[in-house]
């Protein structure tokens, strides 16, 4: 598989001192992934078999190649072009999306905001990223877009994420939605078309 605009890279271990999810936090990551898939699937009325079409994977920082690690965002999506091993046909190719969780940024945000809890925070991040995957795979938004189009898409996806999560009864979700309200209102101030 090759990354969009990139090349294959060898796996590289994390640098000393990088904060990663602890082993006792990994079940919360798995729980957040399962919950996010269910919530986004329900919102878009996707069956289990339909979830197989937008091919994607979720990885934590320790599992990422150096090129997939970034500073700042809580996650990023990288699109890879893939095809089954036993075919040479270009028509058998498909897009594969990798949701790259950035543990250091997530853990730093939790440290700065003690009111935030890991599970609801991860759930927001993953619902947000899965919405992007669905929208890319349905061609509702192009993966390659101008800066203005990306800002407008972020605004739309934050709004959809809020809609999906606002009535969810999960301890700590209200605080996460309050954390992201600034992001949502910041997009409103930009004045981009919806």
Image (tube, helix red, strand yellow):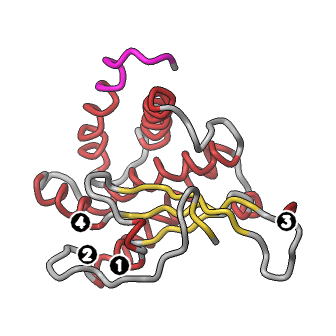
Q: Name the element at disc 4.
A: helix
* Separation of marks 4 and 2 at Cα, in angstroms: 6 Å
Q: Position of residue 190 (x, y in %)?
A: 34, 19
Question: Residue at horizontal 59%, vertical 44%?
Answer: 143
Q: Is there CB contact under 8 Å for labels 1 and 2? A: yes
* Separation of marks 1 and 4 at Cα, in angstroms: 10 Å
Q: Which residue is mark 4?
A: 104
Sequence-wise first label, 4 or 2:
2
Q: On the picture, is 38 further left or further right than 161? A: right
Q: Is there CB contact under 8 Å for labels 4 and 2? A: yes
> As displayed, is residue 178 above or below residue 103?
above
Q: Position of residue 72 (x, y in %)?
A: 26, 52
- Magenta segment range? 186-193
Which is more toward the observer, 38 or 156? 156
Instruction: Give the number of callouts.
Output: 4
Q: Position of residue 179 (x, y in %)?
A: 24, 41
Q: Nearer the viewer, mark 3 or mark 4?
A: 3
Sequence-wise first label, 1 or 2:
2
Q: Which residue is mark 2?
A: 20
Q: Is there CB contact under 8 Å for labels 1 and 3? A: no
* Separation of marks 1 and 2 at Cα, in angstroms: 7 Å
Q: Name the element at disc 1.
A: helix
């Amino acid at each position: 598989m090759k990354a969009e605009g990139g090349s294959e890279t060898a796996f590289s271990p994390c640098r000393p001192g990088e904060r990663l999810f602890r082993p006792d936090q990994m079940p919360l990551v798995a729980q957040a992934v399962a919950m996010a898939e269910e919530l986004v699937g329900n919102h878009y009325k996707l069956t289990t078999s339909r979830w197989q079409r937008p091919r994607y994977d979720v990885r934590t920082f320790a599992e990422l190649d150096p090129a997939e690690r970034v500073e700042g965002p809580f996650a990023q999506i990288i699109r890879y072009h893939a095809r089954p091993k036993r075919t040479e046909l270009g028509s058998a190719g498909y897009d594969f999306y990798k949701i790259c969780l950035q543990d250091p940024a997530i853990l730093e945000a939790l440290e700065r905001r003690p009111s935030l809890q890991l599970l609801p925070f991860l759930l927001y991040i993953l619902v947000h990223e899965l919405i992007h995957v669905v929208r890319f795979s349905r061609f509702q938004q192009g993966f390659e877009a101008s800066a203005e189009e990306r800002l407008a898409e972020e605004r739309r996806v934050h709004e959809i994420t809020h809609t999906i999560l606002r009535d969810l009864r999960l301890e700590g979700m209200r605080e996460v939605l309050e954390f992201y309200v600034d992001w949502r209102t910041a997009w409103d101030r930009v004045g981009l078309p919806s």
